[in-house]
Amino acid sequence: MKRSEINALIKESEKFIASFQFALPPFCSWTPEDWASKGHECDEIRDNMLGWDITDYGLGTFDKYGLILVTIRNGNQNNPKYNKPYAEKLLISDEDQVCTMHFHWKKQEDIINRGGGILCMQLYNSTADEDLDKVSDVHLVSDGVAMTVPAGTTLELLPGQSVTLTQGIYHAFWAKKGCGKCLIGEVSQCNDDNTDNRFYENMGRFPKIQEDEPVYRYLCNEYPEAK
């Protein structure tokens, strides 16, 4: 992805999030110049990858396969320095823009349609060898109500609705075409995007960036070290 594309997406996302009267934490608006003066007091932001996160899964087709994320708070599965056992994110999915099929080994999460369009989510169990289980029913909870759906079912979540995904459930999601993009919430156990994503197809997590203009906001994997 080009830096100019990432910058434009963040600026657009700031306006979209603000339209729901949702205020982001201060670090989401820090500039590279701000970060130049940040010391070890900001290690939690660096170590737990808080802030902006834009991915095209290394496929180079962001409009088709991509996602915008903001990690608002997070503990750390691998560092006892951070004993916070939970995480919270905002995600933005455009119409027919797919967050690709994946599951988590460690993280249980609630995915919530916070507003905008209709959130579509396709679900499968995983087999012992981490393939898609195209036979067995998927057992889950949606807003406190237990449900059982056939393998491969695509749920449609209206604004305010959510689904709880336990470890090992494959899921892909996108905003339904013709209904507008979705502001999505994620409330979960600690998030680790380096080691806890099992994508069904081989792909990357963070984009390769072509630097064609100055950085507007650092992505969560780009922060400079404390001085």
Image (cartoon, rainbow, N blue to C red):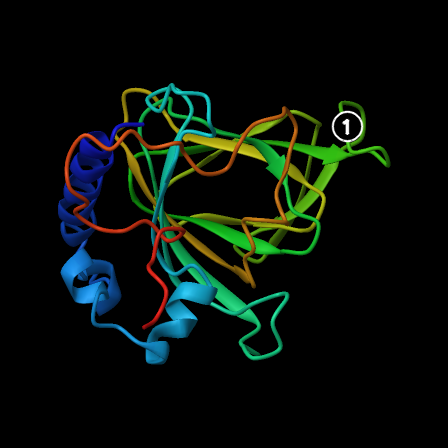
Residue 42: give x, y in percent of width and height: 34, 74
Residue 88: give x, y in percent of width and height: 43, 61
Front-lying residue, 148 or 122: 122
Front-lying residue, 123 or 203: 203
**Left/right of residue 130 with respect to residue 86 in the rendered view:** right
Residue 76: give x, y in percent of width and height: 56, 67
Q: Residue at x 19, y 45 (%)?
A: 215
In this rendering, is residue 187 above or below 160?
below
**Left/right of residue 210 with respect to residue 126 in the rendered view:** left
**Left/right of residue 57 with respect to residue 29 in the rendered view:** right
In this rendering, is residue 197 above or below 72?
above
In this rendering, is residue 207 above or below 166?
above
Residue 62: give x, y in percent of width and height: 35, 24
User: Farthest residue toward the front?
Assistant: 227
Q: Report how many numbered discs are placed on residues in the image.
A: 1
Query: Picture quarter containing residue 176?
Result: top left
Front-lying residue, 55 or 118: 55
Residue at numbered disc 1: 131
Amino acid on which the number 1 mark rests in the picture: Asp
Q: Residue at x 48, y 64 (%)?
A: 87
User: Farthest residue toward the right?
Assistant: 128
Q: Residue at x 21, y 30 (%)?
A: 5
